[in-house]
Image: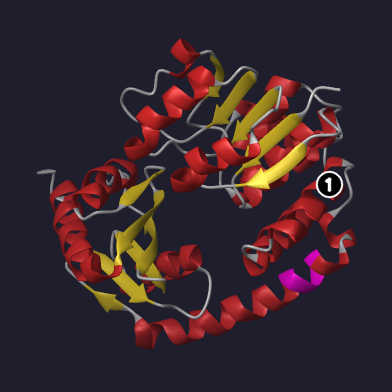
Amino acid sequence: MARTVILAHGDADGVTAAAVAKSVYRGAEVFFTHPVGLLEDFREFAKDAERVLILDISLDEKQLKGLLEEFKRFKGGILYIDHHPLPPGARLEEVGVEVVHEEGPCAAELTFRRLKPGWEMSRVALYGAIGDYALDTPWVREAMLRWDIKSLFLEAGTLVLGLDYIGRDHELKRRIVNELSRDVLPTSIPELLIAATVQAKRIEEMRRKLPQLVRTGRSVAYVVNPPGSLGLAAFYARVLADKPVGLAASERGGTYVISVRAGDPRVDLNSLLRRLAPRLGGHGGGHPQAAGARIPASRLSEFIEELDRAVSAACSGKG
């Protein structure tokens, strides 16, 4: 049998996209990666595979040339499904990659539409759409009419919060992908339900502590090493300080992992982070209103200052 490898992001959208794919390719091996790690992980895990699906992974500009060369050398088939803005020069089709790319829908929706599994897997794809706030698409609006919305949001919330708590436990995430691929409800996966309950309490505790931890610039509110989810810390920092952008950063081994959230449509975080982060020796990108970056620890203050200036310029119409 053809060896199939799935390389997916480890958040709710990536996990549900992987589950939809695994419902079609039952014997597929699942590995979790991220934009900066994609090149190395492709080399390691896709070796000898006949089919590789890359799901919900933004392409990092610094590694783009190496990725294109690696894809061109690969003897099997590659299917790339993603919804992040593509960097300039990402000519994947020219190196034999099948590309499914659309910025509005989540990756799980795109995977469902491309692979066409049984209709029951639409519920799993909807979990990904809810987790990624990608609800305003024709497919999602139609699909949600066929499921009980109260149960749908309960299951999606359990999955999102549980995955946040689980973090980088990839073996457990693989088991969750396998269960979801068989349309098992997230609330019926004991480890996930417990993790979601603990994470919900953590988030509330963090929310109550954030007013004392948030610092502000002119247009950016930020918190360093928050006691919980970076994405939610960035969101609440923005809300609490009433600023256009919120940022949360956590130090890991000499690098700050950063999550940024915007509430002003004039701010394109993907463009800003793709431009600013490499200048400071890091990587950045994502969506216009939700993006992330990795920055050397010594450059964090500089990064926040530059981002604050850029956001202020964008909001004043000078960016």
The quadrant of the rendering that contains the N terminus is top right
Name the one closer to the observer, 263 or 286: 286
Q: Position of residue 21 (x, y in %)?
A: 75, 32
Q: Reply above or below: 223 against 218.
A: below
Left or right: where does residue 164 sit relative to residue 174?
Answer: left
Comparing 162 with 240, the one in front is 162
Look at the image and tell me in which quarter the C terminus lies: top left
Which residue lies under the disc numbered 1? 178
Q: In the image shown, does 308 or 297 lie closer to the viewer?
A: 297
Which residue is painted at 41% across and 78% down in the image?
Answer: 225
Q: Which residues are drawn in magenta?
A: 192-196
Residue 148 seen in render = no
Residue 151 location (% of width, % of height):
82, 54
Magenta stretch secondary structure, dominant: helix
Query: In the rendered structure, does residue 316 fall within the stretch colored magenta?
Result: no
Q: Report how many numbered discs are placed on residues in the image.
A: 1
Instruction: Kindly identify the amino acid type of the residue bearing the numbered disc 1.
Output: Asn
